[in-house]
Amino acid sequence: MSTPDPISSASLDRADSRVRNDESFAGAIRSFVDRIRSGDLGMLPVIVGLIIISIVFTALNPVFLAPNNLVNLLFDCATVGVISLGIVCVLMLGEIDLSVGSMSGLASAIIGVLWVNTGMPLPLAIIAALSTGALVGVVYAVFYTRLGMPSFVATLAGLLALLGMQLYLLGSTGSINLPFQSDLVRFGQIMIMPAWLSYLLAVLPGALLLYRGWHTSRRRVAAGLAPLAMRLVIAKAVALTVALGVAAWYLHLGRGIPWMFALFVLIAVVLNYGLTRTQWGRSMFAVGGNREAARRAGINVNRIYVSAFVICSTLAAAGGILGASRLASSSQQAGTGDVNLNAIAAAVIGGTSLFGGRGSAWSAVLGIIVIQAISNGLTLLNLSSSLRYMITGAVLAIAVIVDSLARRSRVTHGRG
Amino acid sequence: MSAAMQASGPEPILRLRGISKNFGAVSALTEIDLDVRPGEVVALVGDNGAGKSTLVKILAGVFQPSSGTIEFLGQQVTLSGPGKALELGIATVFQDLALCENLDVVANLFLGHELSPWQLDEVGMELRAWSLLRELAARIPSVRQPIASLSGGQRQTVAIARSLLLSPKIIMLDEPTAALGVAQTAEVLNLIERVRDRGLGVIIISHNMEDVRAVADRIVVLRLGRNNGVFTADTSHQDLVAAITGAAENSVTRRQKSRADQATSREPGL
């Protein structure tokens, strides 16, 4: 207390000499390495995974990296990816929903029965399917918050019950074909964004990043805080724009970017905003990190649980609708098999922790690209589904191991 | 004695009458009365299991009392949850601090009370965080660090700063110095005095009699869930211990006596 502040004239957050502020490029790289070493892996495993996958599968079958194969990959990503976004929400609270596959199957059955069999207008059928999802989410939340039922068991029961409902709705025929010329099926199979729009959207994130960086910096300076390191912001924006621009150009060598994938990314953007920039998102992280502390801070914890379960089941239903439009049918097989595990694996591989309190919407986007790339690559190699299941299972196990080890390391390095 | 002491001074901010709390067959608190006035530090002391933390949790809205009334600023209130207590102006620093380790200092300070809920005002919150911590003469290197990386004392400071965020009328500190070193303990005691001088009521729970005597205007003793006397800081140590343990003859006095006996019996030998 007796010694004066080393630099008392510095802005408030730069007054303490004990903190290293990495503002140069070398400094940024150094703090990045520090972060990785302490177990704060973020998106790194996904990026490394994608590079390895691309190299291996391209070596085995060059078609893997062909533009049109990647376009198909994006179509497939969108269906399970939307489900995975919901999974991010429940994992964030340290809970799980094992019934998302069945929920998506039930949603696709509802679309088939209401729209094709009874002739209800498509928008109404979609609303009915989404509301069913929301209702299921409310039921899980009530089971969890009022009856103290672990979400693991509640959703496992839901898995069977929803599958039963799906089979009941579809009846003895077992499968309903959706009309090929309808907008829904065209949306899931052929609708592509115009090239100019793709390029425009590829430039947008970088531009937004720059604008927000500049805006925040100005506000910080006005408030007497140190500005952001603009050089780093610019570097990030340029890197992002180049990466997205190249991706857009490459995909437009083939058919282009599916509207369905754009919808998936749009939902991810909205969820990301909600999680990082709103009070709701902050409360989600708090409840996942320390439930009792969140309660004592005056957060309505039960409402947070309800919101997470409802978002998860509703997005699962949305994924089911997209799945039906992709396959042009509502069948008994919809939502079964590996849909559940792929959705959960995608979130975990992307860096959302199974232990709660850590995660991001982007983890679902990157994670599902990894999962679908593996599945797509194995299909190109003509491997049987038995082998595909085994390999996907192994990848999930590795992802969870990485998550657990990283968590242990974070605890010892004081990164929570 | 206690009635005379409670009657003096300005109108209490907080007035508890006949608060009881049962956990099943166990009565943790029985007919507790407590007054807290503005600009006053009230210490709650008592043995383990005397009901201090239960009383704090009732005032924080974490538990609901089984019977009794709580008056806040002359109005009878029901503290139905932690949010309600905070809203009224009763802030609490819990013994376990109740911080989220995965969030940074700013996020913890503003938890549940973020500025502009639909588009978080990070710059505004960071600025307010710095000025709060400055006010407490706190030494937190960076407010963008997760709580997990802070030391016990720094966490305590964050918890105390958080209790001041909503400009409360009363602040309750449950064992605020238990995890702290010598210098940090002194800082917390200074802080308590600063808070008192701003006209807030302070309730402090501590097992450390020195700390209690140093800052408390009144010392309220609980024993087995009941009021067991109200004392001032100049009450002798003996009397306080007697009130806490319930008898003049207790393990503390016996120990002191036996040590004194040993000392006198050794003297002739020298």
Image: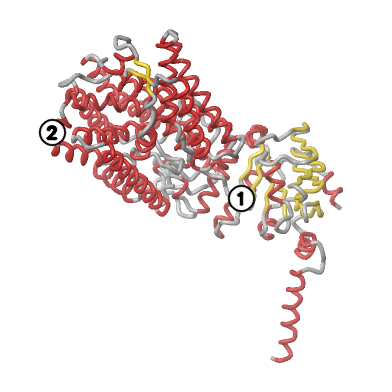
Q: In this view, does A262 lie to the left or right of B119?
A: left
The residue to which callout 1 is attached is B95
Mark 1: few/some/many CA within 10 Å (<14, 14-19, 20+):
some
Dot 2: chain letter:
A
State the image coordinates of residue B144 (x, y, percent, origin top left).
42, 41
Horizontal side, residue B9 vs residue A164: left or right:
right
Q: Mark 2 points at which residue?
A: A62
Amino acid type at mark 2: Pro
Mark linked to residue A400: none
Q: Which of the two discs, 1 and 2, sits closer to the camera?
A: 2
In the depicted structure, whether residue A59 falls above or below residue B54: above
Residue found 51% across the figure and 35% down from its top: A157
Which residue ends up furthest to the front in the rendered image?
Answer: A172
- Total labels: the figure holds 2
The residue drawn where x is 46% and y is 19% is A129
Residue A310 locus on image (x, y percent): 50, 27
Q: Are marks 1 and 2 in contact (CB under 8 Å)?
A: no
Position of the C terminus of chain B, as image quadrant, is bottom right
**Front residue of this view, candidates B258 and A114:** A114
Q: Which amino acid does label 1 sit on?
A: Gln
| x then y, percent, for residue B107 | 48, 38
